[in-house]
Every structure is written in structure tokens, then in C-alpha cells.
Image: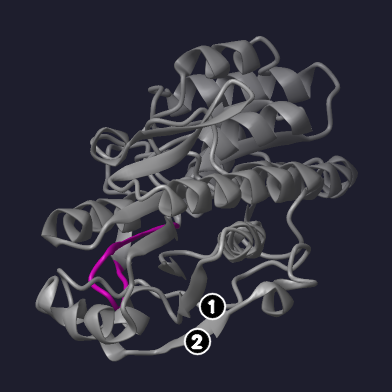
Amino acid sequence: MRIGVMTAGGDCPGMNAAIRGVVARSTAGGATVVGFEDGWEGLMRGRYRPLDRNDVRGILVRGGTILGTSRVDPYVHGDGYESIRETVERVGIDRLVVIGGDGTLRTAVRIDDDGLGVIGVPKTIDNDIGGTDVSFGFNTAVQIVTDAIDRLTTTAEAHNRVMVVEVMGRTTGWIATYAGMAGGAEAILVPESEYDIQDLAARLRRRHQSGHTYSIVVVAEGVPAPEGGSRISGVDAFGFDRLGGIGETIAARLETLTGFEARTMALGHLQRGGTPTAFDRILATRLGVGAAEMALEGRSGIMMAVSGDEIVPVDLRRACADVRGLDVSRHREAAWFFA
């Protein structure tokens, strides 16, 4: 059997651990593994290389992905399955393990429908993939944001400032809520819950008037502007919506309404980079091993998922049907500590 593996979409801490899991388990089962470079683009352009156990030694702790990634999509930037057919047939791929987020996995469904058996591995710092309790990369992103909030708190306190921290998450508030709770934020704004900027400003004023010299406000990048404006700041080079900039808008309004100096910190791609946490290394490894076992069994059209503490196969189509939004009960728990 020949198993292909690829990483696509945004980079994410733990991708190398997942690749390592796929390669180690596949080769132990007698299969040959081929790694496609730069996501779907590698399949479209015929860029690949063999991977054996020695090729993945030492990559567990590395961020990014040794295979590279891109946002190229064969159904958007090519002729669909025909864009990859020649490579698939020439290389002789029996199963393809796709490590990606919701967009990548939706493309994987179409590839599976068109003839190449696919096993998905969910990765995203946004934690918004359906069918699984958690995605690898999320834990690392939350830790990075929490560390940043801890540091920003000291400078905010020294200058009697409101610090607005903008975090990733696309249209969901998972990172904002978990990191905001861990960092002791005075307010957390997420797309899943409406907010009143006037009420927030009044709460911050009361906090400062009671003797507190700073406030931390965490804002998810997908939160709409106070006046209901668009959360889309533009379009990237691949034609996909680009979010970001809402932190500046919120900070400006809070400064006007409270009279306190407000500064913005948009953590951006810092949240994706660096060494994955131990949790994400273990999770990504287990998901990669599980995907390899499904490939060796000849399974396809499935995604490896977390259910409780177990790694289980779920239907790939159902998992990709909807974006998994934040459970608003998590936000309500955090709200007990708001200013």
C-alpha cells in the first residue's frame, strides 16, 4: 500500500507531530509513505517526496510543517479532481491522509467523492471543526495568548490603560474565551454573543473609579464592529476573506467613551508559531497514528476525532457540514469575572 500525506491551509502547532504519527504507524504496517509539498498545490504540480521513519525523527517539537502548506485549492484554483489525477495515478496513491482545517477538509470530501480515498486529521488553532471535541493547535494558541495577556497586564497597570487584545479564531470565539478566562480579562468579546459597547465602557469606568488602574479586553477577530460594520478587512491572495482590525475599532470607541487611554495588541500569526505544547504534541501524534491505521485498513471518507479521551473515526462529510461555534456556556462562565 502507498499512503500519501499532506498539510494544507494555515499552519498550526502540532502538524509535524501528526506527520510523524502517520509515517511511523504506516511504515510499521508495511506501507510506503509519500509526502506532498505545499498542500493541494503539491498534488496539482506533482511535488512530493518519500517519507520514512528517519525522515520524521526530531520533528515532534517543531512548529510549522516539514511538508509546507498553502491555501491553493484544486476546486478553486484548478480543474477539480482533474488537477491532481495525473499525480495520483503516476505516484500510485491508495489512500491520502489530509491534515487540515475546515476548508481543507471540505475539499477532502470532494476528493474522496471523486475517487481518491481520504482520511482527514483535524488541525486548527480556531477549534471550530465539527465532529471532534478539540483540534490540535488550539491548546498551544491559548497558551501563547495567555502568556501575552500576562505580560500586557503589567504594562497596562503601570500606565492606567485599557489594553485591547485581538486574537484569531475566524468566526468563533474559542481562543478569546479560553485565553481571556486564563488571563483574567475584564471583558471578552466573541462572535457568538452580542455586546453593547456603551455598557462595556460604563463597566470599565466603574472599575477604574473603584481604584483599579488597568483593564484587559480580549476581542475575537470575527466580532462585528460596534455599529454593526463588516468584520472583513479584505481578501487574501487566494481570494478568501481576511479578518482583522476589529481591535483597533473597539479600542478607539472605548477611549472615546471612557476617557482612558486605550492601546491595541493584535497577536496575529504569533498564535500559530513556535513549539506546540505537550498536549498538542500528544493529541496530534494520536490523531496521526489513528489516521494511518484507518488507511492501512482501507477505510476512507472519515476523519479522526477526539471523543472524551478516545480517538475515533467519524464521517468526514458530517464533520465538515458546519462550523463548530463556541459553546456560549463557556462565555457565560467567564462573564462572572468581567468588570
Q: In which quarter of the image is the N terminus?
A: bottom left
Disc 1 crowd rating (10 Å Cα; few below 14, some 14-19, many 20+) is many
Q: Where is mark 1, residue-wise?
A: 67
Answer whether residue 247 is visible to the viewer in this image. Answer: no
Q: Is 332 left or right of 156, judged from the image as shown?
A: left
Membership of 324 in magenta stretch: no
Q: How many marks?
A: 2
Q: In which quarter of the image is the C terminus?
A: top right
User: The disc labelled 1 sits on which kind of residue?
Assistant: Leu
Residue 265 x/y as whole percent: 65, 55
Identify which residue is drawn at 14% across, 53% down. 113
Answer whether residue 179 is visible to the viewer in this image. Answer: yes
- Give the structural element (helix, strand or loop) at label 2: strand
Residue 124 x/y as whole percent: 50, 50
Q: Do the residues labelled 2 and 1 touch (CB within 8 Å)?
A: no
Q: Main secondary structure of the magenta part?
A: loop
Identify which residue is drawn at 54% across, 44% down. 290
Identify which residue is drawn at 45% across, 53% down. 296
User: Magenta residues?
Assistant: 235-244
Identify which residue is drawn at 26% across, 78% down. 88
Measured in 3D between alpha carbons, the distance from the residue under mark 2 to the one under mark 1, in whole angstroms, is: 9 Å
| Frontmost residue, 148 versus 257 | 148
- Give the structural element (helix, strand or loop) at label 1: loop
Q: Where is mark 2, residue-wise?
A: 49
Q: Is 192 left or right of 77, judged from the image as shown?
A: right
Asked if residue 57 is positioned above or below residue 127 in the image, the reply reads below
Residue 73 x/y as whole percent: 25, 71
| Frontmost residue, 80 versus 128 | 80
User: The disc labelled 2 sits on which kind of residue?
Assistant: Arg
- In terms of sequence position, does the residue under pointer 2 or pointer 1 come before the other? 2
